Image (cartoon, rainbow, N blue to C red):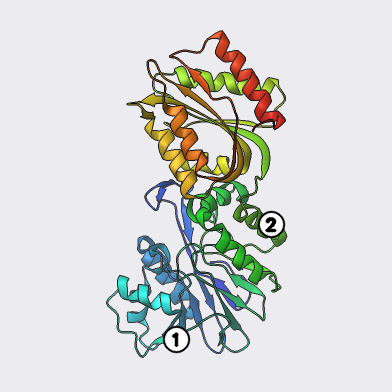
Amino acid sequence: MNKISESIIYVGVDDKEMNLFENQYNTPNGISYNSYVILDEKVAIMDTVDKRKTSDWMKNIEKILDGKEPDYLVVSHMESDHSDNIANLVAKYPNMKVVGNLQTFKMIAQFFDLDLKEKSIIVKEGDVLDLGIHKLHFIMAPMVHWPEVMLSYEESEKVLFSADGFGKFGTLDTQEDWTCEARRYYFNIVGKYGTNVQCVLKKLSNLEVKTICPLHGPILSENLEYYINKYDIWSRYIPEDDGVLIAYASIHGNTENVAKKMAEILNQKGAKKVVITDLAKDDMAEAIEDAFRYDKMIVASSTYNMEIFPCMEQFLNHLKGKNYQNRKVGIIENGSWAPNSGKLMKEIFEKMKNITICKDLITIKSTMKENNIIQMEKLADEILDKECL
């Protein structure tokens, strides 16, 4: 357990066995479920944890409370990894009040059979919960990334309890760069809701924040401008780095050879950064992260049953669903008798916002030939020199 201060204590738990978060995102370093206790004249518990770690979390709570009963449970987010233990906590501490907004209590009724009529405190934007010295100001954050999400700002110590905002994959004892796993977390989980994130950032701009306490990942207390700036960039869908992601979907290796040659050509022509990913084998969530990180992308796909090869189609649909925009893309298709994937990929990109598509779609028939390499050279010039139509 970590002390944020003498009065604010971390009581969350690491889950090192979690290797597929939300049953879809790889978490090789596990994940943390963060929860906090504020000790004052009134005692508040900030969120619960996933049922996978109920026992460890309850032990942490009991140790910190040391025989006291909590006055409040503040529910920031109703997703199961943070709400699983609401009923357990209510049963253990029958005099405790549950604090949430109208949407929170609608969802509690969906998840649990609980009678909270005499135990509910319904809050809205700007309401304050007075604990004594500590006072929690509630900030509604609908659709970041669920409709009931709310943040809490503790004014005396200037601590922001940020729900899933500013979170990342990985346990608290994982030694790794925050940005990569926070970016992968953001774009795959919150990415669709950039406009909503921007609304919350505007609200936060009027607050002095010294510490950010998210529901996943480390407590942030230094260089907060860096993290807030990242969220501003990400939520405005602005490319973060000058570089080219080459994402390919290959059946027998021929399209893979094209993608690798494309990377070689781009590097020869001075591309600042070239990243290549095999959509059939590599982590899809990381491919999505890189697509949003860089300002340019080239997609290369085999044609399969007159359609886009499935993993490429999945990738593009993920991007569309997460509001991929403000990028430049080049398209390469492959097919042995009726190449069709390029046209279909182009149609998907055309439904996205502010996507510049390079004018020459490259068609490979089975294997890469010398004339294809000449076309790829032109595509490299086009995408690097910003000469797309």
* Front in this rendered view, residue 155 or 201: 201
**Residue in front for this viewpoint, 364 or 270:** 364
Crowd rating for badge 2 (residues with CA inside 10 Å; few <14, some 14–19, many 20+): few
Question: How far apart, in angstroms, are the residues tagged by discs 1 and 2?
Answer: 34 Å
The tag earlier along the polypeptide, 1 or 2, is 1
Q: Residues within 10 Å of mark 1 (few under 14, many from 20)?
A: some
**The C terminus, quarter of image:** top right
Frontmost residue, 10 versus 305:
305
- Amino acid type at circle 1 is Ile
Residue to which mark 1 is pinned = 121
**Where's residue 225, x and y in %?**
72, 60
Residue at 52% in and 58% down: 193
User: Measured along the vertical axis of the image, is residue 55 above or below residue 117?
Assistant: above
Disc 2 marks which amino acid?
Answer: Asn
Residue 114, compared with residue 12, is above or below; it is below
* Residue 69 visible, this angle: no
